[in-house]
């Protein structure tokens, strides 16, 4: 991978662009002029500035899609004529089904990233909360040749042969935590201290397990335990859905709980 375009320069997109640049990839801002951001690591350990070149309107071999779910179709549609049979899309988004109604050119390879990294953005500044793990996989039977170089510069990145399962693991946790934090306007950890909210967590988790175990016969029916664990681990976080509500943005509900309901 020599050149890659980034669509959606939120916190996760910016962080991915930083790792890609570290791996020697020329990252351009899709649909945008030159873009600059500053990244801050936890506890003020260090910071770095990132500058992405302006879109050059050339054919796209690699595209990272890191837009919010509801913005994806509008942002991606103008780029479709630049994708071709050898293009690879790396989908780095919350939720599932974000590309479902988009007519990608035949032969486009779609890979999905499932990450437990945490970061937030305030205008041009991206504050990294935690660099955890990122799984990448999708429509390829094995990791592509460019992957090894990327792992050297992307902390916690590994190849995953069953990314759909991993997407469902994350989706179900998000389905339990995100909407309830948005309803109660509370931090993730506070869900565990409110009896009514906790009862709703149990209810949603049971529904998730019911749906997921139809998809995956070996599904461990552990959504509640995992949601409790994540709510504890991210106790002081504002979930992405609550952040969207507070900022007046359309939430990703359709791509999280909505996606589950469709199954
Ligand atoms: O992924 C998240 C989100 O907010 O979207 C969790 C894990 C709930 C952390 O806030």
Image: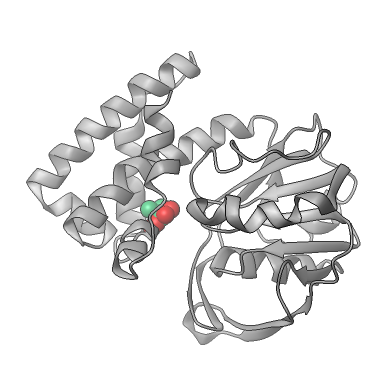
Left or right: residue 92 compared with residue 241? right
Q: Locate residue 94, reporting x and y percent.
A: 50, 50
Q: Residue at x 87, y 44 (%)?
A: 84
Of residues 210 and 75, the one nearer the viewer is: 75
Q: Residue at x 35, y 24 (%)?
A: 209
Q: Locate residue 19, reporting x and y percent.
A: 72, 67
Quarter occupied by residue 151:
bottom right
Quarter occupied by residue 50:
bottom right
Can I make out residue 238 in this image? no
Of residues 103 and 122, the one nearer the viewer is: 103
Q: The N terminus appears in which quarter of the rendering?
A: bottom right
Of residues 126 and 262, the one nearer the viewer is: 262
Q: Locate residue 201, reporting x and y percent.
A: 22, 39
Left or right: residue 251 compared with residue 45? left
Name above or below for residue 83 compared with residue 45.
above
Q: Where on the image, by quarter, is ligand 1?
A: bottom left
């Amino acid at each position: 991978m020599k050149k890659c375009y980034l669509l959606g320069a939120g916190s996760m997109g910016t962080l991915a662009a930083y790792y890609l640049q570290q791996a020697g990839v020329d990252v351009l801002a899709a649909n945008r002029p030159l873009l600059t951001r500053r990244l801050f690591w936890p506890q003020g350990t260090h910071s770095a500035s990132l500058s992405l070149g302006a879109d050059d309107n050339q054919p796209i071999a690699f595209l990272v899609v890191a837009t919010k779910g509801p913005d994806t179709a509008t942002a991606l549609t103008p780029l479709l004529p630049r994708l071709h049979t050898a293009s690879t899309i790396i989908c780095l988004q919350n939720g599932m089904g974000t590309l479902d109604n988009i007519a990608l050119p035949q032969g486009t390879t779609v890979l999905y990233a499932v990450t437990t990294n945490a970061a937030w953005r305030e205008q041009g500044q991206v504050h990294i909360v935690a660099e955890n793990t990122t799984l990448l996989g999708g429509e390829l039977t094995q990791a592509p040749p460019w992957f090894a170089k990327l792992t050297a510069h992307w902390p916690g990145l590994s190849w995953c042969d069953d990314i759909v399962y991993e997407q469902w693991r994350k989706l179900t946790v998000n389905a339990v935590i995100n909407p309830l934090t948005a309803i109660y306007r509370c931090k993730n950890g506070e869900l565990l201290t409110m009896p009514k909210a906790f009862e709703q967590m149990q209810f949603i988790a049971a529904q998730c397990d019911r749906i997921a175990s139809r998809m995956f016969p070996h599904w461990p029916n552990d959504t509640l335990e995992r949601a409790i664990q994540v709510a504890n681990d991210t106790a002081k976080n504002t979930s992405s859905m609550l952040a969207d509500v507070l900022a007046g943005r359309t939430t990703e509900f359709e791509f999280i709980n909505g996606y589950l309901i469709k199954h």
